[in-house]
Amino acid sequence: MSRQRRQDTGPELAFRSSLHSLGLRYWVHRRPIPALRRQADVVFPRAKVAVFVDGCFWHGCAEHGSMPKANAWYWDQKIQRNRQRDMDTNRVLTVAGWQPLRVWEHENAADAAARVALVVRERRARRS
């Protein structure tokens, strides 16, 4: 598993490219808040929006997630821990005034970027 990319995956690069083409500028692979020991894939600090591009296997996508037959007990626990960590991350960010957004790797990058852009622009307008 050490050869699996953790960042700059194909779906993530396509998503970031779509965001960029919509005129949005952002930080990549940063902690939204220092107390959180987790990095978001895309961060909009002024709008306080943190975006996570979740892999279908690693985060247990209901549509595309699959469970390996070998060591199924391990992988089931691993994916459940990932999902619990995702929920905890969302909770911590929300309490801190941030808007966490999750994008699945199987989503159309342009559609996901448009959805995120809408939230970012709305939050920026509210802050002005």
Image (cartoon, rainbow, N blue to C red):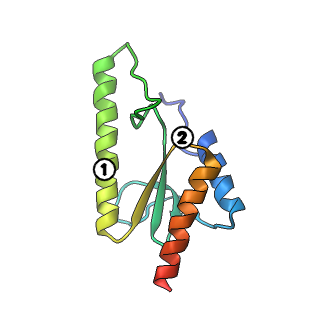
* 5 left or right of 36 in image: right
Residue 53 image position (x, y, % from top left): 50, 47
Q: Identify the secondary structure beneath mark 1.
A: helix
In whole angstroms, how far apart are the C-alphas of marks 1 and 2?
18 Å
Q: Is disc 1 in contact with disc 2, using a CB cutoff of under 8 Å? A: no
Q: Is residue 49 visible?
A: yes
Label 2, residues with CA under 10 Å away: few <14, some 14-19, many ≥20: many
Instruction: Residue at 54% x, 58% y: name it.
Output: 115
Of all residues shown, which one is farthest toward the bottom?
Answer: 128
Q: Which mark is residue 87?
A: 1
Instruction: Residue at 53% x, 68% y: name it.
Output: 120
Q: Nearer the viewer, residue 117 or 17?
A: 117
Of all residues shown, which one is farthest toward the top?
Answer: 70
**Measured along the vertical axis of the image, is residue 20 above or below residue 12?**
below
Please report whichever mark, 1 or 2, sits nearer to the chain's N-terminal start: 1
Q: Identify the secondary structure beneath mark 2.
A: loop
Q: Nearer the viewer, residue 120 or 91?
A: 120
Q: Amino acid at mark 1?
A: Met
Circle 2 is placed at which residue position?
105
Instruction: Residue at 34% x, 63% y: name it.
Output: 93
Quarter of the figure with residue 71: top left
* Total numbered circles: 2
Q: Is residue 46 visible?
A: no
Residue 20 image position (x, y, % from top left): 68, 61
Residue 100 image position (x, y, % from top left): 41, 59
Q: Nearer the viewer, residue 123 or 36?
A: 123
Residue 126 image position (x, y, % from top left): 47, 81
**Measured along the vertical axis of the image, is residue 71 above or below residue 57?**
above
Q: Amino acid at mark 2?
A: Glu
